[in-house]
Structures are given as C-alpha cells and as structure tokens.
Image (tube, rainbow, N blue to C red):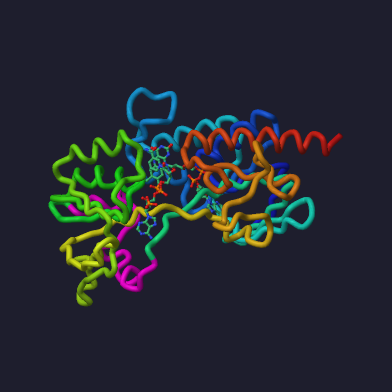
C-alpha cells in the first residue's frame, strides 16, 4: 500500500502505453506507468508479427514488447505492476486507486488499457472454459498435439490462431458465421493453402458438448445459419477468436464512452471529454486496431498531455 504522485499517469503496458511512456519521459515528465494484469498487452499472445515497422523478419510478440519496455525503462519511465480499479475524474489532480490498495494522484492521465477477448456467451461455453475452450492459441495450442481443434471467427486473430495451431494439431476447422472472411487477404491466402485447415462457412456454434467426469470438451453442435441444419463436430479443443471488447469498465460514468464502450476522443486527438485525460490505442474510438496505430496514438497522447501540463504551469 503506497501513495504515488505524478505529473502523468499511464495506465496500460501495451504498445500505446509504452510509447506514451517513451515520449513523456523524453519530455522530462517522469511518467509513472501501471502495467495491469497483462504486461506487454495483447501482442504477447502472438508469436509472429510481420507488420510492425523496423523488422525484416517476423517478430515474437513477447520479445517485441520486452524490447519496448526496456526502451521505456532506459529513458526513465517508472513502472509498477498493479491494476487500476477506480478513478476520480471530477477534479484535478485526478485520483486512481488500485488492486494493491495503492493511491495514485496525477495531474494528467493517459489511458491505454486496450481490449480483451470476447466470448460467445453460451452457458455450455462457461462450463468448459479452461477445459477444452480457450481464447489464446499461443498459450494453449501446445496441449493439442495431434488432436482435432476448431477456431471460431473469421478475423485476423482467428486465421492467425488457425495457422499457428497447425504446428501442433492434426486438423483445424475454422467455423465462420458468414461466407467470406474478415481477415486480410495475405492471411486468407495462407489459410486456404494449408492442407491441415478446413473452413465451415455460414456456421455458428449452438452448443459446446463434453463430459462431466473428467470435465472435458468433446465436440460442438453447429448450426448452418442459412439452412438451419444442425450437425456435430468432434473436437478436443476450441479456440474462440470473435474479437475484443475495450477495457473501460473502470471508466464507465467517469468519461464519455461510445455505445460499444470505447473512449470517445476529440477528432484527430487523444483528448477525452475531460481536460487532462487522454486515451490511446485500442481503447479509444477509431477504426484500426493495430499495434503501430496504438503506438502512434500513444505518442499523440503524450505530446498532448505535455502541452496541457506546460500551459497549466504557465
Ligand atoms: P493492449 O495491447 O491491449 O494493452 C493493454 C494494456 O492495458 C495491457 O498491458 C493491460 O495489462 C493493461 N490494462 C488493462 N486494464 C488495466 C487496468 N485497469 N489497470 C492497469 N492496466 C490495465 N496488431 C498488429 O499490428 N500486428 C499483429 O500482428 C497483431 N497480431 C495480433 C495477434 C493477436 C492474437 C491479437 C489479440 C492482437 C493482434 N494485433 C496485432 C492487435 C494489437 O495487439 C493491438 O492493436 C495492440 O496490442 C493494442 O495496443 P494497446 O496498447 O492499445 O493495448
Ligand atoms: P475482428 O476483426 O473484430 O474479427 C472478429 C471475427 O469474429 C469476425 O470475423 C466476426 O464475424 C466474428 N464474430 C464476432 N462475433 C461473433 C459471434 N458472436 N459468433 C461468431 N462469430 C463472431 O477481431 P480480431 O480478429 O480479434 O482482430 C481485432 C483487431 O486486431 C483487428 O483490427 C485486426 O485487424 C487486428 N489484428 C491484426 C493482426 C495482423 O495484422 N496480423 C492479427 C490479429 C489481429 P464477421 O466477420 O461476420 O463480423
């Protein structure tokens, strides 16, 4: 339990948070960064990043984020392993409280809490989560050596997960609710070329099936959304990759959020509806959920916060 005072509190340790830290530290603001339960953010869940500039070869996500962290530390960002649980945005300095009962007093805040995996919301999914159902292929794929698995979703994450799983699994079935994928074309081509993968189009999971003793998933009941036809698929594991929701529970009723929970920022800016509070990365409204975009907005947020703090001092 401790009391911290800082000019600039950065909440989150993904590409947005670390980049904000790098810029704020270089501006002499001595930022304090609270890393949350997923140090390094979402990229730590992938082993192959090909589109972050500066690297000729595919990068491991955990390594990339470790390098970003080291850069931020070297420039003087103070980092604390903690999770913010409440925030008072009604007056300055802003006050945040945390899981470890710490109190953070900040003249400005950059929120970079990113997003988390979405689930399908079926009762049977709840039952077998952790017993054959996962949302992290890079974490759990290894357990499915020579087994049959399925991936739900048609975005980049689903395709990357499916391709990654072919390293272990006997066969991977991608189950997608439409007749075309959302993922980028390069990933699609790789998927279609892989003979360990098949795609079930226009299909959704209506139930997860398994045994109680031991608790274990054994298959899926699948519904064709065009014909209504039901079928069974035997699988040992299933990976849910149906997108993400923003980590904004803490900021509900404290900041302006969009209908789907993203933090609303002013056009071409990271400023929220509260002066001195900025949002960067996947947590803010915007179309592109990419690491380089998150890093870019972390930079913008830090520059805007610096301007705000210096005009306040004057
Ligand atoms: P995140 O990376 O989500 O980080 C959020 C941070 O906030 C975490 O450190 C978390 O611990 C912290 N946090 C959350 N709540 C709190 C709290 N209450 N208190 C304190 N801290 C908190 N993009 C690409 O450009 N290329 C890719 O190849 C690519 N591959 C991907 C593969 C996968 C499997 C996934 C899921 C995403 C991928 N993305 C990729 C998207 C990319 O990961 C995100 O766009 C990017 O990580 C967003 O960065 P961020 O900093 O906004 O948030
Ligand atoms: P996404 O792009 O939102 O895709 C989610 C997928 O799940 C969509 O295909 C969607 O179907 C499907 N879906 C959503 N709800 C569903 C439900 N209830 N039942 C069945 N299917 C459902 O999410 P993502 O793939 O996690 O990607 C998130 C962001 O990270 C994207 O911007 C993506 O580009 C980025 N990312 C990039 C890379 C990369 O650049 N290599 C890798 C991973 C992620 P519909 O298509 O019908 O909507």
Above or below: residue 304 compared with residue 10: above
Residue farthest to the front?
227
**Residue at left offset 68%, top offset 32%:** 303
Left or right position of 209 against 75: left
Residue farthest to the right?
314
**Residue at left offset 18%, top offset 66%:** 231
Q: Position of residue 62 (x, y in %)?
A: 39, 40
Quadrant in the picture for the N terminus = bottom right
Left or right position of 120 against 170: right
Q: Which residues are magenta?
A: 121-144
Q: Position of residue 134 (x, y in %)?
A: 31, 58
**Residue at left offset 46%, top offset 43%:** 40
**Residue at left offset 39%, top offset 36%:** 63
Q: Nearer the viewer, residue 312 or 123?
A: 123
Left or right position of 273 against 76: right
**Which of the 4 quarters of the picture holds residue 20?**
top right
Quadrant in the picture for the C terminus = top right
């Amino acid at each position: 339990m401790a009391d911290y005072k800082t000019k600039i509190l950065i909440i989150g340790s993904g590409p947005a948070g670390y980049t904000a830290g790098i810029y704020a530290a270089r501006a002499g603001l001595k930022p304090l960064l609270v890393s949350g339960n997923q140090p390094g953010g979402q990229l730590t869940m992938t082993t192959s990043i090909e589109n972050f500039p500066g690297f000729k070869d595919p990068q491991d996500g955990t390594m990339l984020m470790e390098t970003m962290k080291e850069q931020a530390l070297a420039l003087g960002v103070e980092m604390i392993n903690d999770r913010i649980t409440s925030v008072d945005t009604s007056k300055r300095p802003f006050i945040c409280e945390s899981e470890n009962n710490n109190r953070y007093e900040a003249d400005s805040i950059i929120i970079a809490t990113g997003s988390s995996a979405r689930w399908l919301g079926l009762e049977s999914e709840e039952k077998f989560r952790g017993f054959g159902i996962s949302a992290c292929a890079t974490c759990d794929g290894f357990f499915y050596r020579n087994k049959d698995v399925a991936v739900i979703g048609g975005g980049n994450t689903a395709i990357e997960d499916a391709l990654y799983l072919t390293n272990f699994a006997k066969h991977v079935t991608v189950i997608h609710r439409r007749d075309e994928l959302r993922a980028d074309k390069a990933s699609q081509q790789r998927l279609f070329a892989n003979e360990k993968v098949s795609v079930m189009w226009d299909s959704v999971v209506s139930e997860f099936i398994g045994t109680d003793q031991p608790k274990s998933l054994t298959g899926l009941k699948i519904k064709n959304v065009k014909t209504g036809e039901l079928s069974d698929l035997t699988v040992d594991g299933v990976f849910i990759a149906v997108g993400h929701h923003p980590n904004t529970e803490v900021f509900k009723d404290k900041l302006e959020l969009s209908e789907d929970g993203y933090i609303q920022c002013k056009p071409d800016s990271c400023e929220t509806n509260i002066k001195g509070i900025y949002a960067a990365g996947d947590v803010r409204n915007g179309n592109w959920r990419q690491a380089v975009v998150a890093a870019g907005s972390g930079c913008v947020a830090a520059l805007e916060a610096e301007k705000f703090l210096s005009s306040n001092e004057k």
